Image (spheres, helix red, strand yellow):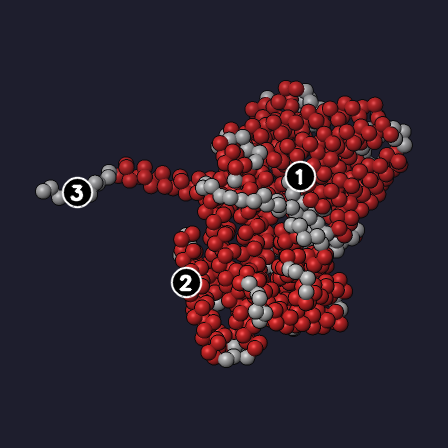
Amino acid sequence: MTPATTPTYGPLTRAAHWLALALQDWRQTEGERWIYVGKTLIAAFCALWLAYRLGLDSPSTAMTTTIILALPSSGMVLEKSFYRLCGTVLGCLAALALIGLFPQQPVLLFAGLALWVGLCTSGSALHRNAQSYVYVLAGYTACMIVLPAIEQPTQVFSLAVTRMAEVGLGIICSAGVSSVLLPRHQGTQVMRTVQARYGKFLTFCQDVLQQKLTPAQVELTHLQFAADVAALELGRSAALFEVTSKVSHVRAQNRKLHAFNATFMTALTTFYTFHRLFDRLQRDGETQVMQACAPLYAIVAEALQATPSQDSLDTMQRHLQTALAQARADIDAAHIKHAQQIDFDTVCELLERFARDMSRFHEVYFSLAHDTPLDVSTPQAYAPKTPPALVLASGARAGISLALLALGAYFLAWPYAGTAMLMAAVFCALASSSPRPIMMIRQVLAGFLIAMPLSLVCVYFVLLHGDGFPMLVLSFAPFLAVGLYLMTNPAKLGVGLGVSTFITQMAPLNVMRVDGAAFLNTGMALIVGLMLAALVFAVLLPEHTMGHKDHVGPALWREALHACTAPARRVKHRFDNRVRDLLSQLNAAAGPVPGEATRAVVRQALTLLEIGHSVIELRELIASARPGATRHALQQCVDGIAAWLRTRGDAQLQAALAATLQAGAVVRAAQTETDATPERSARLQTALADLHSIYTSLLDHMAPGAGDHHAA
């Protein structure tokens, strides 16, 4: 028998293999960034060349459009392109209407323009999703057309058509290049996000059960999970714009993606409720309850150790039922105190609930990952909303600042004052949807300051020595690549955007004119406009910015009250969405290292989330219960909690605690009735767990470190 031999490779084969691995690693890391830079440069210069060939008035606008639309995936580019086109059309129509109404009345024209920009900015702040870009574009596109047409109103139609042509050309080039040249499909990114979220949640549950995380880490993880929910929804909507085989897959899974977010939020909330009760039992030293529950924790922790399957989760539920029966027998034999008995029953109920929620979450994930059939009811989509005070403040800030700046520019003798005012108006609108607007403007301003000397070198020391479009490309490409490369770093995105857009603004017209004074004036106007925008945010309603804790806190209280008083139809899904969305806003505004004040709002949010979920469960029981003492007591409890949420007073808090205790006594009495069916007994036991969860949440709210509920 001939022994097996290991194949040997020559030095060329080994070198080729090493080179292939190195290229693959480069392609997945640094290569992604340079591919992004290369594709954007191609789109930008294609748009510029076509603008020259078509004889458009401002070829740089088409080039700048490609920079603004430069996003990592083809789905994101197509989505933003569509909404940019819609916003441009609306802005052009608004400009035509304003000039038609006030052709020779600059003051009234500025007032109408300010009102339009304020309304558009409020709309952008209200929605905060991809559609919000329509409102932003509709606002500042009207400015770009109206302001140059003030002195020559008869030219407004020509300006609108030219603007549409320039923006449309940039959109076509960006969409074409991103979809054809080494496309990066958003549908694939969505599925990677789903897998990463599932793994992250399993790791989080394991770390919490093994007590590896501090309370601060647990709170910040909940904050990040809220941001992940919003990010998945944005990615899902962008994937629907891709025209590939992937898009049909994403559209088919659209309802599953909504269900994935919904089941994730449910499982996360149940797990937090269980974890908070577990921590309190440890602090109170209830050793008998902890000892009886230890096997239950072990079963859940073991099921989550490895990557679970549906069979392993079903097995976990069966083992959990067996262990629960044994634990109940041990507790009954121990004759513990009544309060400890309630704690034990609540732990059992929450563990059973978490096992069911986790099983459903895994079922949805498995169906997404392996494209298997799944019966999904029509889920309500995740819809981000903004507190009304911030919406009104964003619109008022944009409208007032535009009116003041427009009047100032109109009466100044500086010919480039209009450019400065226009830049200020654009960034006032763009930054209104940003959680940290001043930081965003500072980054873009830093990019402008870097780009001004680069543009000077590019135009007056390089471009002047070349002739023809190829030399123009060679002159601009190295400088533009600097800004595009910076845009690939999320921490320096604003700086890169500032460098890139400034340089594209210096692209020559069809007939190139060398004018040093115009270059300096234009550069100064762009920089002054950004400084004015930063000044506006620093002076006008500086505390009314997206995700500010002083607005997120009261909004959380309003959502908890809504859970108590709103019509029952889909109130649970709305409550989950709104609370997670508010936490997502808070996370974006807090930055990479949230402070103690932010963490206090997070603690308050999680407490209100727990209370809201329990109240919704009680309301469902009340709706299906027959009239009697139990239903009346539960309704009194819900009314008491609503009264406390409405006033946040100490007297109302004590009344809510008393109503919760009274409801618990009535429910326990109902459990002893001889005519109680097994189904009714199970529902009463669930109500007891919810009441206990509400009661301990109210007590935790009163405890030191729970957050100042008056300040929230």
- Residue 89 lies left or right of residue 363; in this view the side is right
Residue 110: x, y in percent?
A: 85, 37
The amino acid pointed to by label 3 is: Thr
Q: Nearer the viewer, mark 2 or mark 1?
A: 2
The residue pinned by badge 1 equals: 131
Label 2 crowd (10 A; few <14 / some 14-19 / many >=20): some
Q: From the top left corner, tell me how far across and down residue 683 is, in percent.
A: 57, 62
Kind of residue sitting beneath label 1? Gln
Q: Secondary structure at mark 3?
A: loop
343 left or right of 452 in image? left
Q: Secondary structure at mark 2?
A: helix
Tell me if residue 701 comes above or below residue 578 in the rendering.
Answer: below
Find numbered disc 1 in the image and state the secondary structure of the residue it sits on. Answer: loop
Q: Residue at position x 66%, y 19% from top? A: 54
Separation of disc 2 and disc 1 at Cα? 48 Å
Task: Check residue 5 in the rendering and tell me which mark sits there, or answer none.
Answer: 3
Q: Is residue 446 above or below residue 282?
A: above
Q: Quadrant of the N terminus?
A: top left
Residue 265 visible to the viewer:
yes
Badge 3 local density, few (<14 within 10 Å), some, or many (20+)?
few
Quarter of the view holding residue 660:
bottom right
For badge 2, the amino acid type reads His
Q: Which residue is mark 2?
A: 319
Pick the quarter of the image with the C terminus: bottom right
Of marks 2 and 3, which one's residue comes earlier in the chain? Answer: 3
User: Of 366 and 74, which appears nearest the observer?
Assistant: 366
Residue 433 point in image, percent of width and height: 69, 46
